[in-house]
Amino acid sequence: MVNSTQVSYFTLGAYFDTNLFTYFFFMIIMSLYLIIVGSNVLLIVVIGVNRSLHEPMYMFLCSLFVNELYGSSGLFPFLLIQILSDVHTVSAPLCFLQVFCLYSYGAVEFFTLAIMSYDRYLAICYPLQYNTIMTFQRVKVLTAVAWLPALLLIVILTSLSFSLQLCGNIINKVYCDNYSVVKLACADTTVNNIYGLMITAIIVFGPVLLILYSYMRILKVCFSGSKQTRQKAVGTCAPHLASLLNFSFGVCFEVSQSRFDMSRVPRILQILLSLYFLTCQPLFNPALYGLNMSKIRSRCKSLFL
């Protein structure tokens, strides 16, 4: 048995020889990353420079776009280096840093989506009191609530994994994954498993319950309200629900792949499923909100005209 601090590197076992397609895959990954960076930065700038967009909903969207940049930057540069490498290894400190980045990205995503649902609940159910309740100070506090607890929870998770005694260093993924590291442990992982269940409840089930509650109240108001109220609710809530469902499906794919035997699934499909929630969400959100929200769409057009 060796301590994880003595493991100098991990080997990523999911990579395979792509021969002549190496540079083709490299160009695809590079193009996706450039699109993600360009689209998210564009929307952050548009919201930042237009004072008419300095409203709570757009401030939360800005936080969401920053998180997409954060999560994709924790994955894509790493993938680009690995695709061109002959030996697919990663140093232990860099591996745990990537675990922290990707898991905290997922936590912030769920927390931000939950806060956005609460914001929509207040705007639709309490329109007259909305500006009084959702002040700029409260927006700052809620944004901090979306980020700081998530970062703290994942710091503890990563620290627990870092302190494990490991009996191997092969991770069967294309990036570093906390559950894969824990499976390498030859010491008792009870504390890790209990803490993992606890933060899953906090990070996933807590926000999902808040979102369900918010939308139940919104639906109640819509059914009892006017046609204009229903149209407003659909216009502002549909992108949020689509984003939530897309991210939730991606996370479910990743959890299922980590926990169940996927040996009968083609390797390329395993890789695509594991990358879905880290790739599609940063691409999906800018397109979803940029195209569907008229204020953002008009500001984007004016920026180029």
Image: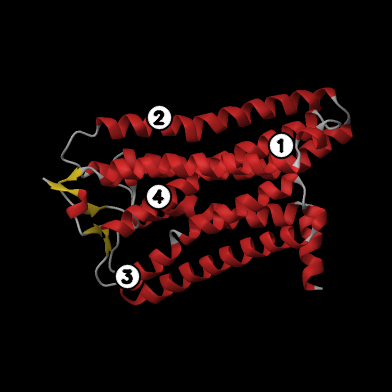
Q: Nearer the viewer, mark 3 or mark 1?
A: 1
Q: Is residue 67 visible?
A: yes
Disc 4 vs disc 3: Cβ atoms closer than 8 Å? Answer: no
- Label 2, label 1: how far apart the Cα atoms are: 26 Å
SS category of the residue bearing label 1 = helix
Extreme residue in the left direction: 1
Tell me which residue sits at (83%, 32%) in the image.
127
299 versus 134 height, above or below: below
Residue 57, percent from left and from top = 73, 45
* Disc with the residue nearer the chain's start (4 vs 1): 4
* Disc with the residue nearer the chain's start (4 vs 3): 3
Which of 198/248 is in front? 198
SS category of the residue bearing label 4 = helix
SS category of the residue bearing label 3 = loop
Tell me which residue sits at (61%, 41%) in the image.
113
* Disc with the residue nearer the chain's start (2 vs 1): 1
Residue tagged 3: 18
Residue tagged 4: 100
Residue tagged 1: 119
Horizontal arrangement in the rendering, residue 266 relative to residue 29 (left or right): left
Tell me which residue sits at (78%, 43%) in the image.
235
